[in-house]
Image: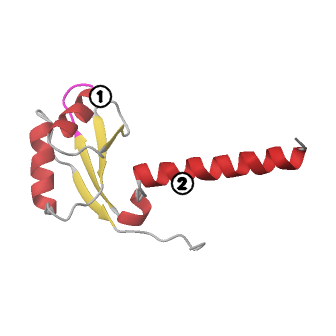
Amino acid sequence: MGARKWAALMSVLIFLLSYWGLCVNGLKMGLILTGVHKLKYPIKNAADLSTIRDNLYRIGFKEAKVVSYGTSKDVLISIAPRVDIDQMILVDKVMQALPGSTKQRVDFCGPQWPKSL
């Protein structure tokens, strides 16, 4: 086969794989397009981020992003907004998942559309 035929075959194959992946997984709206709740919690001891992620996953926040913020005792949690949970209920549930922590800051950042769109 010539180089053009191989390139066309690879192009069709990549297209079909991409289409299959889109059908199986669907579109995932990122935090930029949906907005995000940002919660900052200082913890008494050094934070174990994997344990915090597991606790949040267990109570239903599977998409939560947990990062160390500032010192090793500060945790910043980003959670996409959900229609079925009010912000105050969300904060209370997260507090239950983080024993020994205090709420320092709760923010909601709305969706931001890049200028290129």
Q: Which residue is mark 1?
A: 50
Quarter of the image containing the C terminus?
Answer: bottom right
Badge 2 crowding class, 10 Å Cα cut-off, few under 14, some 14 to 19, many 20 or more, is few
How many marks are shown on the rendered structure? 2
- Counting from the top left corner in percent of width and height, residue 58 is at 16, 36
Q: Residue at x 21, y 34 (%)?
A: 43
Q: Which mark is residue 2?
A: none
Q: Residue at x 22, y 46 (%)?
A: 61
The type of residue carrying mark 1 is: Ser
Closer to the camera in the image, 7 or 41: 7
Residue 76 drawn above or below residue 99: below
Query: In this figure, which colouring scheme has been used for the structure?
Result: secondary structure
Q: Quadrant of residue 80?
A: bottom left
Closer to the camera in the image, 19 or 26: 19
Q: Residue at x 30, y 30 (%)?
A: 49
Badge 1 crowding class, 10 Å Cα cut-off, few under 14, some 14 to 19, many 20 or more, is few
Mark sitting earlier along the chain (1/2): 2
Q: Does 44 appear in magenta?
A: yes
Does residue 100 appear in the picture of this structure? yes
Does residue 47 appear in the picture of this structure? no
Closer to the camera in the image, 36 or 84: 84
Query: Horizontal placement of 50 versus 7: left or right?
Result: left
- Counting from the top left corner in percent of width and height, residue 99 is at 11, 33
Rounded to the nearest angstrom, the CA distance separating label 1 from label 2 is 34 Å
Q: Nearer the viewer, mark 1 or mark 2?
A: 2
The type of residue carrying mark 2 is: Tyr
Callout 1 secondary element: helix
Query: Horizontal placement of 108 versus 11: left or right?
Result: left
Q: Which residues are magenta?
A: 42-47
- Counting from the top left corner in percent of width and height, residue 68 is at 36, 36
Q: Which residue is mark 2?
A: 19
Quarter of the image containing the N terminus?
Answer: top right
